[in-house]
Amino acid sequence: MIVRQFLQWIRHAPAGERAEATSALARAYLHSDLSNDDLAAAEGAMIMLLDDPSPLVRGALAEVFASSQKAPPVIVHALAADQPDVALPLLARSPLLNDEDLVDLFATGHPDAQVAISGRAMLSRPLAAAIAEVGPAQACLALLENADADIAPFSINRIVERFGHLAPIRENLVGRADLPMAVRQALLAKLSQTLAGFVSARHWLGSEHAEYAAREACEKATLALAAETPYEEIGELMQHLRQSGQLTAGMILRALLSGNVVLFEEALAELSGMPLDRVTSYIHDKNISGFRALFGKAGLPAAAYPAFREAITALREGILVGEQGGVSRLKRRMVERVLAACAAERSESMASLLALLRRFAVEAAREEARMFCDDLVANDRDSDFAPQLTDARMVA
């Protein structure tokens, strides 16, 4: 009886009043002690209201049913496919929408609807994978910001591949304490590519020069990152670098000339496919022939072999004993020794290697000078200024 009166009245009521009455009817359906006949009549009336021309009316239904397990499924599914301002509460909260429903709604939805789905509580791993695979940047960012989302590592990798060049995505990922070092390095590479494109687009540098500068900066940052990487993650980092084409002879030589023997060993193990313990024994064996064979199996250019050979010899002689600055920066004495040894061979095939070593030598000298000046200023700051202040008071 009440539903019949409601249907007669709603035909001529304005949209705002229809929305209020619809909200009351939906709440009565959920919370009032209605008979089975009244429940069926109320559900029929609300299904009819799905065709109401005003989004206020349909939105009123969606808001009441958004969090309810007892809502009529047919109404929930219809409203979830409605225009975004109607559907958003259901997409964000409805327990009646399963993963299959949400994946379908996400694929065909408005960007606002996709963001709402990405922010759902207790978001499952399969749904997160679908969002990471096809979702726009805004939805992927909402997924990363969703503390309740169960996101698999491969989905994180996919987001990095697709949107690692975007600052909001990078900032969110870098702030995650559980982010593997390989993914952090992938973000570094994306940032380097973005900066190179930015610089060359404004004609501040030529495209080749910009790409080289960005690649060099990425290598330096990668070594700094590797220096902080737990030992058990180094192998995974090397695998990522190889697969992404970044595990080059130049990067490996930079690591060796910085004293990062762990990275050097892991890199050769990754490239050669040999067990790490065998790689380590070849590197540290006094008979250099074993290392020569390992070097060739790793696929490194033959022209670079003299530099690696001389660096290993210098390490065995203790050239880095007493060196400061950790294993993330080039060591000047090491670089200059290797450069001198390679220059003495005067082979035309080593022209590129010598050019690289000269750049390394300049970088190492500048870094050493910077460290020296920083230490000098830090140690002498108080003693330098105190006499000047005393003299100034006496003159005054």
Image (tube, grey):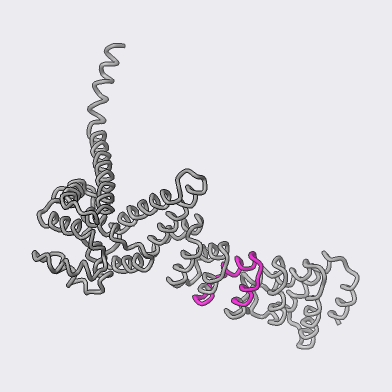
Q: Residue at x 38, y 66 (%)?
A: 244
In which quarter of the view is residue 311 placed?
bottom left
Confirm whether the magenta stretch covers residue 396: no
Q: Nearer the viewer, residue 221 or 17?
A: 221
In which quarter of the view is residue 243 placed?
bottom left
Q: Residue at x 27, y 48 (%)?
A: 360
Q: Residue at x 62, y 77 (%)?
A: 104
In which quarter of the view is residue 24 placed?
bottom right
Residue 259: image x %, image y %? 21, 55
The answer to whether residue 362 is left or right of residue 69 is left
Q: Is residue 290 above or below residue 31?
A: above
Residue farthest front in this picture: 348
Residue 379: image x %, image y %? 22, 34
The answer to whether residue 278 is left or right of residue 98 is left
Quarter occupied by the N terminus: bottom right
Q: Residue at x 45, y 45 (%)?
A: 205
Q: Is residue 333 above or below residue 142?
A: above
Q: Nearer the viewer, residue 172 or 338?
A: 338
Give, as a single range, the part of the protein colored magenta: 103-127
Quarter occupied by the C terminus: top left
